[in-house]
Amino acid sequence: MDIVQLRIFAETGGNTATIVEQFPFQLTFDSRKDGVIQQITQKSHGVNLHIEYKFENIKHDPIFYNGQMRTSLENAIQRIIKLLGSRTTKKIIETFTKQNIRSVCKESPDFPRVDSFFLSEEDDPDYEMLDPAVINDAMIVGLCNTINTTVNVLRMNLEEDAIDELLVYMWSVTLSTGINVVLPPLAITSSVRMRELRQQQNTNVLERITTQLGSLGLGTDGTESMSYDEIERLLSWMYKIFYLIGGLVQEQYQDQLITKEMVNIRDLKILYKYDYQWLQTSYESISAECKQLMESELQRPANRIGGLLSRSDSVMARGTVQSRREYEEQVDDSASVVFLSRELILRVILAKEGAASLDYVESKTREFNEYSKNLENEIIAQWIINN
């Protein structure tokens, strides 16, 4: 049993108010009236107060607690797996750097080149994949030995599924680290320090901006674009790790290694060969295709619940780093590749042209995000008008 004080206030100033009337009410929680609408009716000095309310005892189904425990357990396992592999993933990040790639290329310029990470149904059936064993740079061989040692030690105490989860995670770290070595993130164009440097009227501003690329902590570790040979060398290292891990995991986990982000590996080699003008033209084309896909997808009623988009993150942010994965789960593979390609082209431009392309990349990123937000607002406004 609780006493509820219902009060009416009148503001008398910016931060003050006086009580006009108050209605003390005794509220009794009666389990027999669970979920039944009840009323409060009070009168005082000509003021009538009428409130309807109901209370409910929340009784979760046992399945709820089962699912809650399962989710908590899975989250805990993921944290433990990352902790178990922390030393190895740290070594992956330390190995895949521009300095290491350039050092190896200078010491031994000849190396086996990778045409493809895997064959598709359309490829030549007589084509033989490169044997990973011929990729024998000391750094990558040492990393492979570390991964093998880690797996052998963990196998004494962990089940096979847990080890496979760890290996899949190691590959995701290798994939993201390798690509980020070549391609600076788009976030670099909107960083506070970068904006400050670009606003300075100084003849050496481009040199100063370029110097800052490595000090912003955004994934770049050098001031010069990588050469095509250096990129090929890096991809050969990733290829060796890919087939090492693929051979260690059980068959049911192998598909998890082949992600949509691997499209970046295929397209990176192609895009890096083209000049600035061609890349700009290609970006305009792919950006228009992204906008068309967004417009058609947002017109589907299934994507809206009560006039609002069904996912917590904005659907219109597709193509941005923050919510690209959520979007990819909702559309087919071909559409996912389009959005990945839009971002990839901008990152290739930034990698190849450096500081000189910052204004272009930042303006295109801002333009796409503004278009996305405006389109989302338009769709929501239309629903409100129609409903």
Image: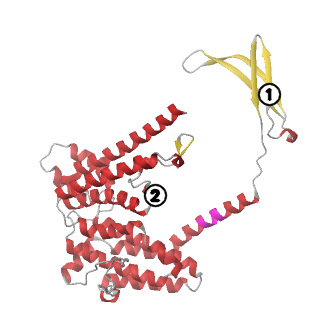
Q: How far is mark 2 from mark 1, CA to CA?
A: 49 Å
Q: Nearer the viewer, residue 123 or 281?
A: 123
- Please state the extent of the stretch shown in magenta in the rendering: 70-74
User: In this picture, is 32 found above or below 24?
Assistant: below
Q: Nearer the viewer, residue 180 or 249?
A: 249
Q: Position of residue 304 (x, y in %)?
A: 53, 45
Q: Main secondary structure of the magenta part?
A: helix
Quadrant assignment, res 47:
top right
Residue occupying image coordinates x 31% and y 70%: 266
Q: Position of residue 43 (x, y in %)?
A: 79, 16
Residue occupying image coordinates x 60% and y 81%: 159
Q: Position of residue 226 (x, y in %)?
A: 22, 68
Labelled disc at residue 331: 2
Mark 1: secondary structure? strand
User: In this picture, is 235 found above or below 198?
Assistant: below
Q: Quadrant of the N terminus?
A: top right
Q: Nearer the viewer, residue 28 or 258?
A: 258
Q: Is residue 73 magenta?
A: yes
